[in-house]
Image: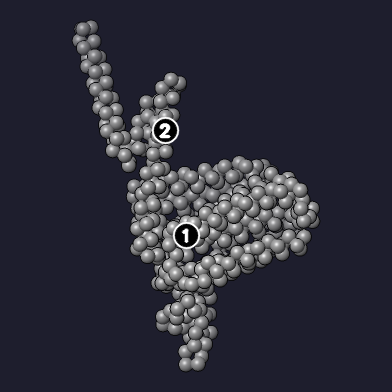
């Protein structure tokens, strides 16, 4: 039992050490292409570990499923890990927006952002471990605590629905106030240092204040996300490992998405629905339990719809988030966004048109569906605008012909 936990923690520490001491030993501005590559790496690593979870529970290796965790089949354990990972990953997207605001507020130079996020992730891992252990103990000892978690998630969903990110006030953070009392704060950044010396006295740099705000914000997000995963699984090993892999990719995901923050207008609404759904699932868990595979499908559907709506939305947020990364990266992100938007519109629009054509030979509003598909394609493609105009002109001509025919028929009757 101890060997498995120790092995997993050692693996995570090794990956973090390679990240800081080898790959990112020198401070540099993280490019979007590099961030996308690291994001793909962390996701692939999580999926590989998911396969390992399947075999661990299937064969009960290292006592998993007996002395460790719950008695689950390999398929059940893998599905619970993956669903928990998707939930934590999706909820971490809201954390990315807050991190971007923090870095923008303190005007952190891009070259130092990776360092502060690295130590922020490391601190988050420690705090998540403590909070997961406490949550697992509460769930194991007090069965009714699951209702408290469900109610907490519903309250969080309501709070997220009415709250905005643009009212962030880091200077009122209790940890920042405490740090200002304990240390003098330098007026500017001292390279990548968190601490320095002023006239022989130890002083904190603004980068340390940024780290405190990032860590405290993660505590608030953990209060939301950790109860959410207990709706999927109560196995401590699956809860902890899915959380860890979601957090490990948070830093690279931030650099990959920071330039596109103002594009995901409806993503926050999607996260509201996810939190609300998970909260309801927890409240119903003792009476009408919802299968994990159904939860995975619902969550994936909510994410897909919210991201698709963000791409198709014509208007921008009235208070768009400013990107804290360089203009070069933002330009690259803009190109990536335009390409992705065209691909999404092409796939969705073409699918709707095909469905409409099939409906022409079956019961259903085939013509209306084809028009809807062309309208979607017309957002980005000129050929679709021409076809849509022809369809409209043809429809008007048919309407006029029918109308004239009815008038002539009425005249003949008289």
Colour mode of the rendering: one colour
- Of tags 1 and 2, the one toward the viewer is 1
Q: Is residue 156 visible?
A: no
393 or 119, nearer to the observer: 119
**Vertical side of 271 occupied by 258: above or below:** below
Residue 143 image position (x, y, % from top left): 72, 54
Q: Which residue is mark 1?
A: 35
Give the quarter of the image for residue 120: bottom right
- Split into 4 quadrants, where in the image is the C terminus? top left
353 vs 129: above or below: above
Determine the image quadrant of residue 168.
bottom left
Residue shown at the point (44%, 29%) measured from the top left? 355
Q: Pointer 1 and pointer 2: residues touching (CB < 8 Å)?
A: no
Q: Residues within 10 Å of mark 2 (few under 14, many from 20)?
A: many
Q: Earlier in the sequence, mark 1 or mark 2?
A: 1
Tell me which residue sits at (72%, 64%) in the image: 6
Q: Residue at the top extreme?
A: 413
Left-right relation of 143 to 222 = right
Q: Is residue 162 visible?
A: yes
Residue 38 appears at what percent x and percent y? 51, 58
User: What residue do we see at 36% from left, 49% from top?
Assistant: 338
Quarter location, residue 294: top right
Instruction: Residue at the far front: name it.
Output: 22
Q: Nearer the viewer, residue 109 or 175?
A: 109
- SS label for mark 2: helix
Residues at marks 1 and 2, CA–CA distance in whole angstroms: 34 Å
Callout 1: SS = helix
| Callout 1 crowding tier (Cα within 10 Å): few <14, some 14–19, many ≥20 | some
Name the side, left or right, on which 147 lies relative to 387. Answer: right
Instruction: Name the residue that disc number 2 marks.
Output: 352
The N terminus sits in image quarter: bottom right
């Amino acid at each position: 039992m101890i060997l498995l936990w120790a092995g997993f923690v050692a693996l995570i520490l090794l990956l973090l050490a390679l990240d800081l001491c080898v790959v990112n030993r020198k401070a540099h501005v993280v490019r979007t292409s590099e961030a996308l590559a690291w994001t793909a790496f962390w996701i692939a690593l999580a999926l590989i570990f998911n396969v390992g979870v399947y075999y661990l529970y299937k064969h009960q290796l290292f006592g998993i499923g007996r002395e460790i965790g719950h008695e689950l089949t390999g398929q059940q354990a893998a599905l619970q890990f993956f669903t928990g990972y998707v939930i934590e990953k999706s909820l971490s997207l809201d954390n990315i927006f807050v991190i971007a605001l923090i870095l923008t507020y303190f005007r952190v130079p891009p070259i130092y952002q990776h360092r502060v996020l690295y130590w922020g992730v490391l601190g988050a891992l420690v705090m998540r471990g403590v909070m997961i252990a406490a949550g697992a103990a509460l769930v194991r000892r007090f069965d009714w605590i699951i209702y408290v978690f469900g109610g907490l998630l519903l309250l969080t969903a309501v709070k997220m629905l009415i709250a905005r990110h643009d009212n962030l006030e880091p200077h009122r953070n209790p940890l920042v106030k405490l740090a200002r009392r304990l240390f003098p704060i330098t007026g500017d950044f001292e390279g990548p240092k968190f601490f320095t010396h002023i006239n022989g006295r130890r002083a904190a740099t603004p980068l340390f204040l940024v780290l405190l705000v990032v860590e405290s914000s993660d505590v608030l997000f953990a209060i939301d996300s950790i109860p959410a995963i207990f709706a999927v699984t109560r196995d401590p090993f699956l809860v902890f490992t899915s959380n860890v892999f979601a957090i490990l990719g948070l830093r690279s995901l931030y650099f990959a998405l920071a330039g596109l923050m103002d594009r995901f207008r409806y993503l926050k609404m999607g996260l509201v629905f996810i939190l609300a759904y998970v909260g309801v699932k927890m409240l119903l868990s003792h009476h009408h339990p919802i299968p994990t595979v159904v939860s995975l499908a619902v969550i994936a559907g909510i994410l897909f719809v919210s991201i698709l709506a963000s791409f198709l939305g014509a208007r921008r947020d009235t208070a768009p988030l400013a990107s804290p990364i360089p203009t070069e990266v933002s330009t690259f992100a803009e190109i990536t966004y335009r390409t992705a938007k065209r691909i999404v519109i092409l796939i969705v629009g073409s699918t709707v048109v095909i469905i409409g054509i099939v409906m022409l030979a079956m019961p259903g509003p085939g013509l209306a569906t084809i028009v809807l598909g062309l309208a979607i394609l017309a957002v980005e493609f000129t050929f679709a605008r021409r076809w849509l105009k022809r369809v409209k002109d043809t429809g008007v001509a048919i309407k006029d012909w029918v109308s004239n025919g009815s008038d002539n028929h009425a005249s003949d009757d008289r």
